[in-house]
């Protein structure tokens, strides 16, 4: 009768694996449900208990949907390109694939032990050539496309060539850098190289000189979301700003669609807001200011507040602005040059974050106010960012906080603008200060109206036009690393050309060392066979490069986000050798119904995949605009870290209870080195880190205590709890239920092992419901009304909870039900069998075992979720006639369960009773259960 969970769990895991019952059907008449987890990077440390939190939630949902009759796609794979495997390869010389393989095997074992219902037949790995062939293929599609803004759609580059041949670029509305206008004749006269340079400006994957985040320690550039507080997310190395030619993706062209799409999807509001802010749409105007004595030159500014134009008292340019060289005067050249050099060292983030000491210099030039013709001094300052708007501002110090500080520092004019209602004044800085000016044609208008009016005037006078600006930047796509997808490009006379797609995959070559070359070029520069033979259509030795038939191949690789931007599509059709995805298969699965993963991917992965998906839709490869219909962020699991205190500037460590006012440094130690609570096992510590062998430990009564602090569970903080240990001790069903019981799925919560035995006890109790006198036995006779009530109430609760992903409340409901059924000694099949079905998504192993013992031949995974009957949920009500001296006066309803005392008390408090009682005393109350109440006076 014992609940032998180890044996049970092994048995069912083996069965699920061999029977492959969780395979999503490729052709099915059933409705589809695609439940996806963010696939893991197979790190060497394996899973800790924080990782499965999201996987358990999505597995519960996937299993529930199968039981509801859906054809469920619930796949798993590995995001197996990336830095750690490469770093390890650099240190050990071992190929990253070897490390990857070991890590993946370990992950798979761990995942299997947790009883997930993954369809392993669709497993994919981003570093597998059969997969990255299609990542490269998508790259080529982007390379061979341009964006037609009049159709809001990406189109083939061949089509733009045809347009150029007919009418040049005069009428075209395309995303891309500004190109001088040309007509059809001019186009046909351009040499091959010029034509290709022009096309480069329209491609959605293109090369450009950009300011990038350069991380010398890692030898690569990083994207903004790979940097945390000015340091590389991986490794914590310093990141610098550097101008480099890199591959970029024109994500900005999709900014509006990326914004609009957010309204169609069910994602956490906070996450959508993060994406909205990242995209950062602003409405305003672009205004031209001419330059004194330089009539051919203009400073263009972007402003969201054209209504404050009469408050402009100076202009500021970003240090990278192209006009600085031309317009700064010889007297100021030296100080300008010095300033530009100094600002190069500051990253964009530093520049944005620096709210105190605004720096800058006057460049000697003056702009002219477009309406008043007043002379406005021009400054350069790095609070203006080169990549935003036009890289220049009209400064309005009375109404813009940073302009205001700048004006104070450089003693510039501050002019308050007054036009209509209060609102402009309210926003003014130091309202009393500065000269007030009435704003001409804007008088009498409120801010909103004045903005529109100002734009109208500016357009009328041809000084500029309305402009929508996005904070979003094009995504830098190349990395100077080995362990990523090769970019399928070769260079002919300096022009980038795509490898014909029939020749994909372009496989990563073997190299002797995974490091950049001595000259700082990417590791692929080390490959001896990395040249493209255009005629032979194959990779050949670099020695054959002749720039006639054989050309050098691109040596940068793709970033980590390339492979993860479309993997959810490949799961639908993983074996397809002829296409990324078969169109019929795509039409069936469409997109992901539920996506579960961490909120740290808000602006990286989740934005890039939406971008690629929209592009693939434009190309007709997918039919949906959005890849992930519903998304849930699982909260973080926190660990209880341990620290030892080192006395500053020494190798002496002091027990935490002895610290008084000495200055100490806190150093993480592995929580597995503790004994009896917070005491450190010093011998174990020395084994763990031999560098502590000579250290001195100051302790009291031979004991050394650590400080504890709750923080994110992470290998780097040495506070991880391994799920394998828990599975061994309590079983996977207990772990699954326990993780869900910790709290709402989207909340951050500390890991606390104390409650786990309670969950384990609950499963044992559940098991015992099926046993009588040590034997498995369930009664076939009809159950009591009481038992049915418990069952139907529980079924209702779970059916409401699962679609809301409120799993912690489901678990409480199960616990209450099992306690109550135990109390009334219920062992009826009619109650227990549906309970097994409904608990199966949460605790699938025990459910399969009991289901089999109940005599079923098929897996419980497909048994239909039971219905509940409202009849059992309503309390039975009894209507009591209330009599006074035998005369019926009124009636009252009471639930049948309420006892005599409570009924009497309630009747006596009733206002009608007071009325019929008057001043008389009650002699007695005659109570006949479920019939009448008679008050004798
Ligand atoms: C005049 C003005 C008056 C402005 C005022 C604001 C308030 P958002 O809303 O974020 O789009 N700006 C424009 N380009 C800039 C750049 N490259 N670097 C730094 N600041 C820049 O911000 C738009 C506003 O930020 C613009 O409107 C401009 O200042 C500034 F009472 O122009 B405003």
Image (cartoon, grey):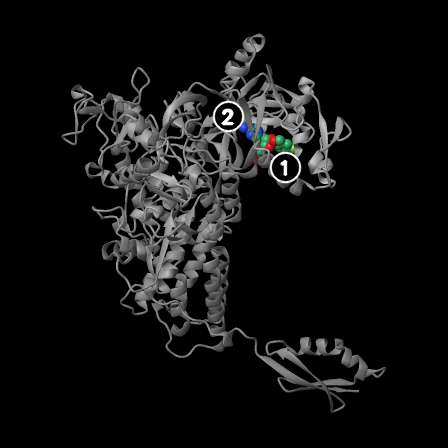
Q: Is residue 288 above or below residue 255?
A: above
Question: Image check: 848 left or right of 433?
Answer: left
Crowd class of label 2 (few under 14; some 14 to 19; many from 20; radius 10 Å): some
Crowd class of label 1 (few under 14; some 14 to 19; many from 20; radius 10 Å): many
Q: In the current view of this chain or complex, which residue is farthest to the left?
A: 536
Q: Earlier in the sequence, mark 2 or mark 1?
A: 2
Count of labels in the image = 2
Q: Is residue 594 above or below residue 702?
A: below
The residue beneath circle 2 is: 386
Question: Image check: 821 left or right of 114?
Answer: right
Q: In the current view of this chain or complex, which residue is farthest to the bottom?
A: 886
Residue at left offset 49%, top offset 62%: 813
Q: Is residue 330 above or below residue 242?
A: above
Quarter of the figure with the C terminus = bottom right
Question: Under 8 Å from ligand 1: the CB of mark 2?
Answer: yes
Label 2 – label 1 distance at C-alpha: 25 Å
| Position in image of residue 467 (x %, y %) | 53, 37
Quadrant in the picture for residue 185: top left
Quadrant where ligand 1 appears: top right
| Position in image of residue 268 (x %, y %) | 50, 49
Quarter of the figure with the N terminus = bottom left
Question: Image check: 337 left or right of 859?
Answer: right
Q: Is residue 699 visible?
A: no
Of residues 392 and 582, the one nearer the viewer is 392
Q: Is residue 252 visible?
A: yes
The residue beneath circle 1 is: 454
Of residues 537 and 818, the one nearer the viewer is 537
Residue at left offset 65%, top offset 35%: 307
């Amino acid at each position: 009768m014992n609940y032998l969970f180890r044996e049970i769990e092994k048995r069912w895991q083996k069965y699920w694996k061999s029977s492959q019952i969780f395979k999503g059907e490729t052709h099915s008449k059933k409705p589809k449900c695609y439940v996806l987890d963010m696939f893991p990077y197979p790190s060497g440390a394996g899973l800790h208990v924080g990782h499965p939190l999201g996987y358990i939630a999505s597995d519960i949902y996937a299993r529930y949907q199968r039981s509801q009759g859906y054809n469920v796609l619930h796949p798993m794979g590995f995001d197996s390109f990336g830095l750690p495997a490469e770093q390890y390869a650099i240190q050990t010389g071992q190929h990253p694939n070897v490390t990857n393989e070991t890590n993946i095997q370990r992950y798979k074992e761990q995942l299997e032990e947790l009883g997930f219902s993954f369809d392993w037949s669709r497993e994919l790995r981003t570093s597998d050539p059969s997969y990255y062939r299609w990542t490269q293929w998508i790259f080529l599609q982007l390379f061979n496309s341009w964006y037609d803004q009049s159709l809001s759609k990406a189109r083939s580059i061949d089509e733009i060539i045809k347009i150029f041949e007919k009418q040049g670029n005069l009428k075209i509305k395309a995303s891309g850098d500004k190109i001088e206008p040309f007509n059809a004749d001019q186009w046909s006269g351009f040499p091959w190289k010029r034509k290709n340079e022009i096309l480069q400006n329209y491609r959605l994957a293109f090369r450009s000189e950009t300011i990038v985040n350069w991380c010398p320690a890692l030898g690569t550039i990083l994207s903004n979301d790979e940097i945390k507080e000015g340091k590389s997310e991986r490794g914590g190395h310093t990141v610098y700003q550097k101008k480099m030619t890199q591959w970029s993706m024109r994500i900005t062209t999709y900014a509006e669609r990326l914004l609009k799409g957010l309204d169609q999807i069910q994602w956490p509001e906070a996450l959508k807001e993060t994406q909205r802010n990242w995209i950062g749409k602003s409405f305003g105007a672009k205004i031209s200011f001419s330059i004194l004595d330089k009539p051919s030159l203009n400073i263009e500014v972007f402003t969201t507040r054209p209504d404050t134009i009469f408050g402009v008292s100076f202009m500021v340019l970003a240090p990278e602005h192209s006009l600085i060289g031309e317009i700064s005067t010889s007297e100021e050249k030296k100080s300008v040059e010095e300033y530009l050099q100094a600002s190069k060292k500051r990253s964009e983030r530093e520049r944005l974050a620096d709210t105190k000491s605004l720096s800058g210099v006057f460049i000697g030039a003056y702009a002219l106010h477009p309406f008043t013709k007043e002379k406005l001094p021009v400054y350069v300052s790095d609070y203006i960012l080169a990549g935003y708007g036009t890289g220049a501002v009209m400064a309005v110090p009375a109404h813009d906080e940073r302009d205001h500080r700048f004006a104070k520092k450089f003693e510039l004019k501050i002019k308050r603008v007054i036009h209509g209602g209060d609102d402009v004044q309210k926003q003014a800085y130091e309202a009393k200060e500065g000269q007030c000016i009435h704003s001409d044609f804007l008088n009498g208008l409120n801010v909103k109206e004045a903005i529109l009016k100002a734009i109208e005037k500016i357009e009328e006078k041809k000084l500029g036009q309305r402009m929508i600006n996005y904070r979003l930047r094009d995504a830098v796509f190349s990395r100077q690393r080995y362990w990523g997808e090769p970019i399928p490009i070769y260079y002919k006379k300096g022009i980038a050309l795509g490898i014909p797609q029939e020749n994909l995959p372009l496989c990563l070559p073997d190299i002797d060392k995974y490091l950049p070359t001595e000259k700082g070029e990417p590791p692929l520069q080390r490959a001896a066979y990395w040249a493209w033979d255009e005629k032979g259509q194959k990779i050949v030795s670099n020695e054959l490069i002749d720039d006639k038939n054989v050309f050098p191949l691109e040596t940068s690789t793709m970033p980590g986000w390339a492979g993860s931007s479309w993997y959810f599509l490949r799961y639908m059709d993983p074996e397809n050798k002829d296409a990324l995805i078969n169109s019929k298969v795509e039409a069936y699965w469409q997109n992901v119904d539920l996506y579960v993963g961490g909120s740290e991917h808000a602006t990286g992965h989740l934005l890039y995949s939406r971008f690629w998906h929209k592009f693939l839709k434009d190309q007709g490869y997918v039919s949906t605009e959005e890849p992930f219909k519903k998304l849930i962020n699982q909260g973080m699991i926190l660990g209880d870290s341990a620290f030892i205190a080192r006395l500053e500037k020494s190798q002496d460590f002091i027990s935490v209870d002895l610290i008084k006012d000495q200055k100490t440094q806190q150093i993480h130690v592995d929580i597995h080195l503790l004994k009896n609570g917070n005491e450190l096992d010093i011998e174990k510590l020395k084994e763990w880190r031999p560098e502590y062998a000579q250290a001195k430990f100051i302790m009291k009564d031979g004991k050394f205590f650590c400080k504890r602090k709750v923080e994110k569970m992470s290998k780097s903080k040495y506070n991880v709890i391994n799920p394998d240990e828990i599975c061994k001790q309590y079983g996977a069903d207990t772990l699954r239920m326990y993780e869900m019981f910790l709290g709402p799925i989207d909340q951050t919560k500390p890991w606390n092992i104390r409650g786990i035995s309670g969950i384990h006890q609950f499963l044992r109790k559940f098991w015992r419901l099926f046993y009588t006198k040590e034997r498995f036995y369930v009664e076939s006779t009809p159950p009591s009304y009481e038992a049915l009530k418990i069952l139907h109430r529980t079924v209702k609760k779970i059916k409401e909870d699962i679609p809301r992903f409120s799993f912690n409340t489901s678990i409480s409901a199960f616990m209450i039900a099992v306690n109550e059924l135990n109390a009334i000694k219920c062992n009826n099949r009619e109650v227990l069998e549906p309970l097994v079905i409904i608990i199966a998504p949460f605790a699938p192993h025990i459910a399969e075992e009991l289901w089999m013992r109940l005599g079923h031949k098929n897996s419980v995974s497909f048994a239909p979720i039971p219905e509940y009957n409202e009849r059992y949920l309503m309390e039975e009500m009894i209507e009591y006639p209330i009599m006074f001296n035998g005369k019926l006066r009124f009636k009252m309803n009471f639930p049948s369960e309420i006892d005599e005392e409570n009924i009497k008390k309630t009747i006596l408090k009733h206002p009608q009773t007071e009325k019929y009682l008057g001043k008389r005393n009650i002699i007695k109350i005659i109570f006949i259960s479920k019939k009448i109440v008679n008050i004798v006076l």
